[in-house]
Image (cartoon, coloured by chain):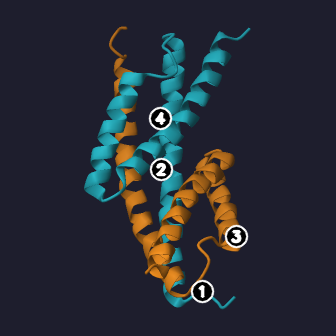
Chain colours: A orange, B cyan
Amino acid sequence: MDAPPADLQKLRASIDNIDAALIYLLSERFKCTKQVGLLKARHAMPPSDPSREQEQIDRLRALANDAQLDPDFAEKFLGFVIKEVIQHHKSASQQTAGP
Amino acid sequence: MDAPPADLQKLRASIDNIDAALIYLLSERFKCTKQVGLLKARHAMPPSDPSREQEQIDRLRALANDAQLDPDFAEKFLGFVIKEVIQHHKSASQQTAGP
């Protein structure tokens, strides 16, 4: 196949910059949720919190509308991240309750 | 259940700020990939590009290591986003090739 057109290379460079920013932000987010997990385990709170999650969904859908992002994708994205977080919380809870 | 401890509220406020930043960045990313999709459709390039994707995976795993984020999660995240992008590209391709 031909080399990608110059426009494509420019767009890919921007995508790569955005991806780096996303990775560093996700890392900060997981630092926060790790602390949340430890707090929850210490206070014997359940790993998931449906009312908090519903608030997050509603808020992210509104932000997505403002950002001209598909709100359904924003909700799917949050679900994807929360699924990972809850896994981490469960592990933290098991470690706290462990021998 | 008791009100969440003050520490939990602070952490959640930070998570909410990070999530807003993620949503706005994802929106910018999709603006780029939408243009990529149009370019690819115009040049009759296939929606997915395995060698580009492998480069992205390798790069994001290295960035994740630097950011102290689980590289497996970074790879899963990229896969999640690319899956959405390829859906968009397929739709764009069908619209270009359409009647």
If you read the primary sequence from the N terminus, does the residue marked by circle 2 or circle 1 appear first? 1
Q: Nearer the viewer, residue A43 or B50?
A: A43
- Residue A18 in the image: state x and y as whole percent: 39, 45
Q: CA distance from mark 1 to mark 3?
A: 14 Å
Residue behind mark 1: B4
> Which residue appears farthest toward the right when viewing the image?
B99
Eyeballing the image, is A62 above or below A32?
Answer: above
Numbered disc 3: secondary structure: helix
From the image, which quarter does the C terminus of chain B lie in? top right
Q: Are marks 4 and 1 on the same chain?
A: yes
Q: CA distance from mark 2 to mark 1?
A: 30 Å
Can residue B3 be seen here?
Answer: yes
Residue behind mark 3: A50
Read off the chain for label 2. Answer: B
Residue behind mark 4: B32
From the image, which quarter does the N terminus of chain B lie in? bottom right
Residue behind mark 2: B25
